[in-house]
Image: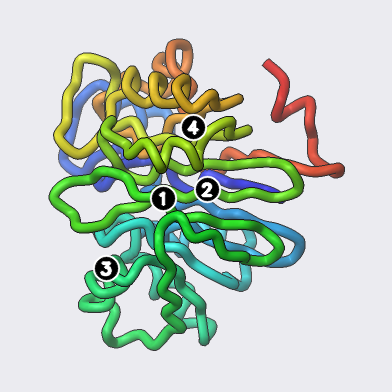
Amino acid sequence: MRVVLLGTGDSPGTPVIGCHCKTCEDARKHGWERKRFSVMIQNGSRTLLVDTSPDMRTQLLRMDVEKVDAVIWTHCHYDHFAGFGDFYRVQSNVTVYSSPEVHEEIGKYMDFLKYRSVEVESYEPFEIFGMKVTLVDVNHPPLRRSHGVVVEWNGYKVAISGDTNKDVQQKSRAFMLDSDLFIVEALAPEGYHFRKHMNAGEALQLAKEIRARRAVLTHLGHFFPPHSIAIKKYPLGYDFQSFSFGEEAKLNEFFGP
């Protein structure tokens, strides 16, 4: 199984259009960026996407993905679903999993696209391509529903926080417990406070509380210093960062320092 961070940015990405802060200017000068959030999970020949960012076309071309086999939508915000049509136009019968409430909200926008909608409830595991997948509820006001995702395969566990503030439900934390990899959103460094997101300190505290073996921060805003500076303090993810699990995995790369 392979997990790839297709995009590690927040809703406007980095650099932000029209912004000339130190981070955005560094990104322009040195040619780096943070595309919008999406995670790719591949098992065997099958590809699952957790969210479909507005940068989907570029992300899939970069990874040489010719077919998407299934999608999970975590919530109904534009930066997490709007790229669905980028690959839908070149394939058909895409299966999309989420809760009834998330399907209802996104369906208002996706009415012109015909896809296979599968409704699943939080805390009720289901199987995708040999992996056990569970949606868990998180707190992302003012939305009715927003989800994290837990994927288990061959004794490994990967948890994805989804967009959330620090008030993640105890039942959800229990499902995330002892994750080998925790992909957790952190919009900004400590000192910033948001009603519906976490800062890096809150995200790392959550990782500690669920005893995650490794935490990687994502959904990053331009509030962080330039990546080359911020990475010295925080375990920031970066676009197209890859993690492998299983007998063929580069275990030294994943479990090393």
Q: Position of residue 97 (x, y in %)?
A: 45, 69
Q: Nearer the viewer, mark 1 or mark 4?
A: 1
N-terminal label among 4 and 2:
2
In the rendered image, residue 116, in percent from the top left (x then y), is placed at 46, 83
Q: Residue at x 32, y 37 (%)?
A: 168
Please name the residue shown 52% across and 41% down the image.
159
User: In the picture, which quadrant includes the C terminus?
Assistant: top right
Residues packed near mark 4 inside 10 Å, few (<14), some (14 to 19) or many (20 plus)? many
Going by the numbered disc 1, the residue's amino acid type is Val
The image shows residue 257, relative to residue 172, as above or below, that is: above
Q: Which mark is residue 101?
A: 3
Q: Which residue is mark 4?
A: 237
Marks 1 & 3, CB-CB < 8 Å contact:
no
Q: Position of residue 107 (x, y in %)?
A: 27, 77
Tell me whether circle 4 and circle 2 mark residues in contact (CB < 8 Å).
Answer: no
Nearer the N terminus, badge 2 or badge 3? 3
Looking at this view, is 73 or 154 the one in front? 154
* Pointer 1 with pointer 2, Cβ within 8 A: yes
Residue 10 vertical position relative to residue 75 in the rendered view, above or below? above
- How far separated are the C-alphas under marks 1 and 3? 14 Å
